[in-house]
Image (spheres, grey):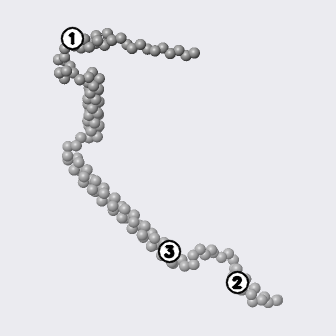
Amino acid sequence: MAQRPPQAAQKSDKKRGKQPKKFVEQQDAAIKLALSIAEVQEGKSKEKVEKRKQTLKALKSTGERKKDSNKPSAKDRIKEKKAIIAAQKAQKKKEKVTTRKGPTAGGNEKGRDIRAGEASQVKKRAEPAPARKRVSFA
């Protein structure tokens, strides 16, 4: 049999069957890196959890104080606000009426002279309306 050249023998030795793929040359370094990243992330998440617990404790303590004080509930506060708004609307309506009627002599509408009011109304009726000019379109 013929002997193979030495180069051919080396090539055939390297290609024995299917070889596994190598993604990382140093597996230990990659594993250590992944572990350190995981530890950092876990530390951050624990800090967040601790902060949340502290805020919840603070809210509970203030919540207990609020329960002790006599604060009205949300529904009661809404009713109070509605009553305030209704009172403000009524006040504005009254002001509008008084400004429309004009200032009274005594400041009290019930005390004014009825005849004086009638006389002013008669004068208004007696004055003729100004004549309107007619316009025609051709």
Q: Residues within 10 Å of mark 2 (few under 14, many from 20)?
A: few
Q: Secondary structure at mark 1?
A: helix
Q: Residues within 10 Å of mark 1 (few under 14, many from 20)?
A: few
Q: Position of residue 109 (x, y in %)?
A: 20, 19
**Amino acid type of the residue that numbered disc 1 sits on in the rendered structure:** Arg
Q: Indicate which disc, 1 or 3, sits on the residue closer to the N terminus.
A: 3
Q: Marks 1 and 3, Cα distance to the nearest angstrom? A: 106 Å
Q: Which mark is residue 115?
A: 1
**Amino acid type of the residue that numbered disc 3 sits on in the rendered structure:** Ile
Q: Secondary structure at mark 2?
A: helix
User: Which quadrant of the rendered structure holds the N terminus?
Assistant: bottom right
Q: Is residue 31 left or right of residue 15?
A: left
Residue in the picture at 31% in, 13% down? 124
- Tell me the residue that label 2 is attached to: 13
Residue in the picture at 20% in, 43% down? 70
Q: Marks 3 and 2, Cα distance to the nearest angstrom? A: 31 Å
